[in-house]
Image: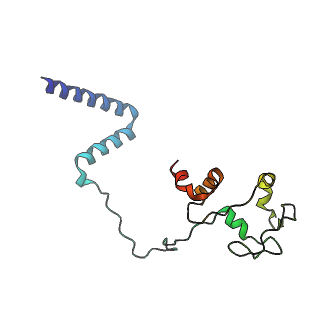
Amino acid sequence: QQVNDEIELQREHFRRLTVEVEERGPEAVRQARDALFYGLHPAEDNVREPEVNENPRGRPRTSTSRIRSYYERSRSRSTGPGSSGGRGRSSGGRSRSSGGRSRSSGGESDEHDTEFVRPLLVGDFNPSPDGHCGFRALSHCIYGDDSHYLLMRSA
């Protein structure tokens, strides 16, 4: 008796769903029909695995280079005498005699946006560029050294 009641409840639920789908219009009826048909007959579905492209175009995606951080990019820009203008830190460092502003062909540099922070700076810290540099910098700010970077990452 309990099994028959369960079957009857399922049938009634199916009837209510059928009425609801019909009320939504012909597109809903088509979608429900297709879902039922392909659910019951998966072999009839025309969807197949795509063919493997043996001749892919474009640049290969096997590069292991990373995107340099804002700090690394800003340090590599040429800012005048004493700067190498190449990658990495320059031997002469950045000149601060210009008041923190420099002019380039594109207008004011990105340093202008952070000029208000200069009085608050105590020093600079250049974390290892190993992909954890943000966590190392945070560890340096909180603990005074970058050895707790894994603790920062897990938080």
Residue at the left extreme of this rendering: 1
- Residue 106 vs 13, above or below: the answer is below
| Spot occupied by residue 154 in the image (x, y as percentages of width and height) | 50, 50
- Residue 120 vs 66, above or below: the answer is above
| Spot occupied by residue 134 in the image (x, y as percentages of width and height) | 60, 57
| Quadrant including the N terminus | top left
The structure residue drawn at horizontal position 38% and vertical position 31%, both measured from the top left corner, is: 23
The structure residue drawn at horizontal position 31% and vertical position 44%, both measured from the top left corner, is: 35
Residue at the front extreme of this rendering: 144
The structure residue drawn at horizontal position 53% and vertical position 51%, both measured from the top left corner, is: 151
Q: Nearer the viewer, residue 139 or 25?
A: 139
- Residue 87 vs 44, above or below: the answer is below
Name the side, left or right, on which 28 lies relative to 112.
left
Name the side, left or right, on which 20 lies relative to 137.
left
- Residue 94 vs 11, above or below: the answer is below
Q: Nearer the viewer, residue 129 or 111?
A: 129
